[in-house]
Amino acid sequence: MDLLKRELDELRPLSPEQEARILQKFRLDWNYNSNAIEGNSLTLGETRSLLLHGLTAEGKPLRDHLDIKGHNEAVRGLEEMVHDERPLTEQFIREMHQVLLGEGYDVPAQTPDGQPTRKHVQPGRYKSSPNNVLTVTGEMFYFASPEETPAKMTDLVAWYRQEAEQSTLHPVALAAEFHYRFVRIHPFDDGNGRMSRLLMNLILLRHGYPMTVIKATDRNRYLAALAEADAGEIEPFYRFINENVAASLQLMIRAAKGESIDEPDDLDKKLALLKKQVLYQKDAIQILWNEETQENIYTDLLEKWIDILDNQSKIFEDLFMQKSYLVYLSSNIDNSSHTIQKNDLHEFKDSLKNYSKSLNKELEFITIQKRFHHFRQLGNGFNTGIMIVFNFQEDHFTVSNVVLTGFDNKTLEYYWRENSIKSVYHSDYDTELIKNNIYKSITKLYEYLESKALLNIEPQ
């Protein structure tokens, strides 16, 4: 290790081009392999070491798998911290965890007696409940309790600073042992494995070593070495990390000498990461706008919007003499249009459903309106309403919300308009998203009613 490090130091400083090439390679390998390590499909209890060291997806939904963008930003944050010599603190660790995991989410968990449950992960905060593991043998493997975690993390950071100053451990051993001690505390509700590898690399970088990637193909050896450390023998884990650091040093030496550092499977890694970012996200395009999509647009999309709009806007009905429902459908093929208007909701929905199924031309947009006629205030009988506009493109549609201030056969006037949603086509749209979207229109309609009523109230 020392011989390799000395050889690299003699080749330093690297040119900006060499350094950029190396960093690009390390980021690719790190993102790919961390994702591959985390993204297995083993379930709770199938592999003790996977559970203990936070390396299984446990059947989590795609949202809970490693987010490549967050991981890449965490790696960049690590590089910046090395350059500005910011000290390793608990605050930095929590900030890195926030960058790594992003927004809060729910994950599968266990009760103290081993029953399945769920818990909320709040990135950047230490765990709020025990994350001990019931093994397949029925034994409980204990990490630090939530109450113990802050003190143990303070001790871990203090231990690192003391060891770094006294240099009693070889830098690679220091990085490896910090990794292991961090995992044994398991300070967060999720992401402990990824954080331990990020922080291990911070220590290596601080001591002039390159980033070190634990390859997914070495996962079993990695887990076995961690298991031996759990049993009180940390030397195998030291040796495993040494091998990986040596491989990184050799790669960096080749780059410094101007030799190729590309590997035959680099394209496969890039493609795998690209597919994860495109194909496995909730907004991946699965359906295009065609005759079949259009034929099902009422049952898949419009009916839910109409029902939620009508239900949420009922609070305004007694302020008006009458209500009505209107839909306007427009085709981009022959510039034709069709209007359906009814006073009864059920008649309106039946007419729209039947018409949408009979269409033999492609629609460009649909507007749905719930109209309120003649405000019940003397001398102030204005009309208003809410309009939802759907604009259909080949691979997505957009939704706009409008509060109408008047309508006749030729023109529509509005008080407020917002382009609120852009979505791909699918068959199960989020009800809560629709409710929240329409609620904006409801609050804006109230604002308009209040302003109109107040403007026309005379003192008694």
Image (cartoon, helix red, strand yellow):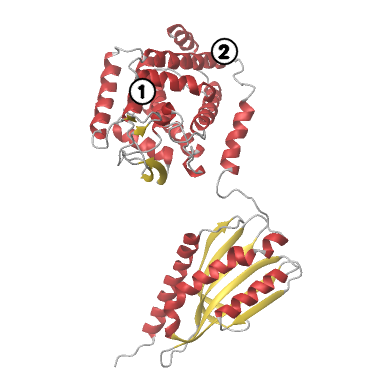
Instruction: Check residue 257 in the rendering and tell me which mark sits there, or answer none.
Output: 2
Q: Residue 291 location in percent, x, y? A: 72, 61
Q: Quadrant of residue 334?
A: bottom right
Disc 1, SS: helix
Tell me if 392 is positioned left or right of 447 in this view: right
Tell me if 280 is positioned left or right of 364 in this view: left
- Near-viewer residue (156 or 85): 156
Q: Residue 85 location in percent, x, y? A: 35, 26
Gap in Å between the C-alphas at discs 2 and 1? 34 Å
Quadrant in which the C terminus appears: bottom left
Question: Which is in the foreground here, disc 2 or disc 1?
Answer: 1
In the picture shown, does residue 344 fall above or below 194? Answer: below
Q: Can residue 214 be seen here?
A: no
- Near-viewer residue (88 or 237): 237
Which kind of residue does numbered mark 1 sit on? Tyr
Q: Residue 253 location in percent, x, y? A: 53, 13
Which kind of residue does numbered mark 2 sit on? Lys
Residue shown at the point (40%, 21%) measured from the top left: 226
Tell me if 167 is positioned left or right of 27 in this view: left
- The crowding category of the residue bearing disc 2, from other C-alpha atoms within 10 Å (few below 14, some 14 to 19, many at least 20), is few
Q: Quadrant of residue 257?
A: top right
Q: Residue 380 location in percent, x, y? A: 44, 89
Tell me if 384 is positioned left or right of 206 in this view: right
Quadrant in which the N terminus appears: top left
Q: Can residue 449 be seen here?
A: yes
Instruction: Check residue 180 in the rendering and tell me which mark sits there, or answer none.
Output: 1
Residue shown at the point (38%, 32%) measured from the top left: 192
